[in-house]
Image: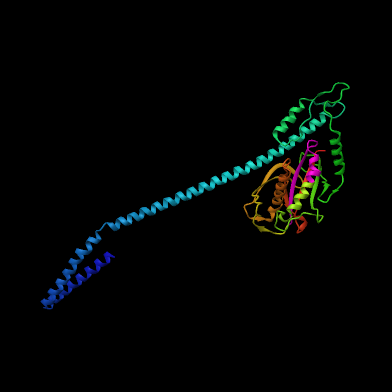
Amino acid sequence: MSYVVMLLLLLNGAVLLEHAYRFNRLRAPSRASCAAALGLLVLAASAWYVWPALNDTSLELARTELVNRKKQISALDADKARLTSETERLESVATASQAQLVLAVARETQHLAILARDVSQVRRALTTGPNALVADSPADNGGGTLDQLRADVLSLATLRVAAPGAAPSVIPNPGSESALDALKAQLATRMTTPNYDVEIYPDRELIRGRVGRYYVVDLKNAALGVRFFFDGGKYTLARSSQEFRGALNSFVSEILTKFEGRADYALYVRGSADQKPYQGGFEPGAEFRRIAFVRALGGEKYGLEMGERRVDGRVRNVDLPDLRAAFLQKIVTETYPTKPPTILEGAVTPKTDDRDRNVELILYVDW
């Protein structure tokens, strides 16, 4: 702005001096003197007032400070972007590590159950038959922890050859064995109760390497006499939780407890969903963001490899089978912590049917 003012003053001074020159040529000395005086006055004023302002360095300093501030802001923005990127990287590493830990725990739990079954089979083979060995103390066939498994393995070292004509030092409880035999005979055909139905699964090796008998357990609403099904897009049974827990408690007390210490068994859960499209959020209190499961091999077969489903908060139809299995796993574990069930990878059926919105409880028994 100062430059414009100075330029205007200089132009005005020059114009006045030009007029003074013209008046002098026109023989008008008084007008020429006035014009010359005014022109010189204007030029003097421009030199006196405007020139110092143009030489003032404060404006240049302000501009320099502004440039420095902009550079600082750019540097802070770069640091912010770098810190944000590093935070996201660390969160990703932590998430991946946690997922790997979940898979490792699930895999080791599966291997521990298989080892417990193998130890039980070896002990049964050594203690039965005409040349059976005898033990000085019974084995703890719980198989639920590494310590129990180690104790069972060490107990094999105590087996010895029975003296001729001597009776085994550990005599099985006839009542327990007869009760287990009676249960086995009862489960040989479809078993129907007000709270649950049990039927034989046609495959003796649903899970690779675990040969035995598998049973599908359908929990029922005793008052209505029907199975529990999920509403469309739902994976919990909040409205029927009391009836559901009552049916589960009946199955645990009437069936599962009879296997404890007498037979090698395991529980599995498998969910399903129909093909009706769905997308929504988590149900309150049941935010299962990571679900570990045994991978399906195809053709209703499962292996030993573990997988994981991650749900980021947006629940889709493909997530519902494993979410329903995770819900049942949670309920069973709370009701019967001695034998937490393992999730088998679920699937979406190729049709729309309310009956496909369910979850199965599968019982495995090594007999």
Taking the image as drawn, is residue 54 in sight? Answer: yes
- Residue appearing at x 59%, y 45% in the figure: 95
- Residue appearing at x 21%, y 64% in the figure: 49
- Coloring basis for residues: rainbow
| Magenta segment boundaries in residue numbering | 251-274
Q: Residue 257: within the magenta?
A: yes
- Position of the N terminus, as image quadrant, is bottom left
Taking the image as drawn, is residue 299 in sight? Answer: no
* Percent coordinates x, y for residue 245 in the rendering: 75, 50
Q: Nearer the viewer, residue 296 or 125?
A: 125
- Give the answer, above or below, for where 50 lies relative to 35: above
* Percent coordinates x, y for residue 366 in the rendering: 80, 38
- Residue appearing at x 73%, y 30% in the figure: 151
Q: Is residue 293 left or right of residue 170?
A: left
In the orientation shown, which residue stands out farthest toward the top? Answer: 164
- Give the answer, above or below, for where 357 lies relative to 200: below
Query: For the image shown, how many numbered marks are present on the structure?
Result: 0
Q: Is residue 210 left or right of residue 21?
A: right
Q: Nearer the viewer, residue 46 or 131?
A: 131
- Give the answer, above or below, for where 171 lies relative to 363: above
* Percent coordinates x, y for residue 238 in the rendering: 71, 54
Locate residue 260: give its quadrant.
top right
* Percent coordinates x, y for residue 305 in the rendering: 70, 42
Q: Nearer the viewer, residue 10 or 79?
A: 79
- Give the answer, above or below, for where 169 lies relative to 303: above
- Position of the C terminus, as image quadrant, is top right
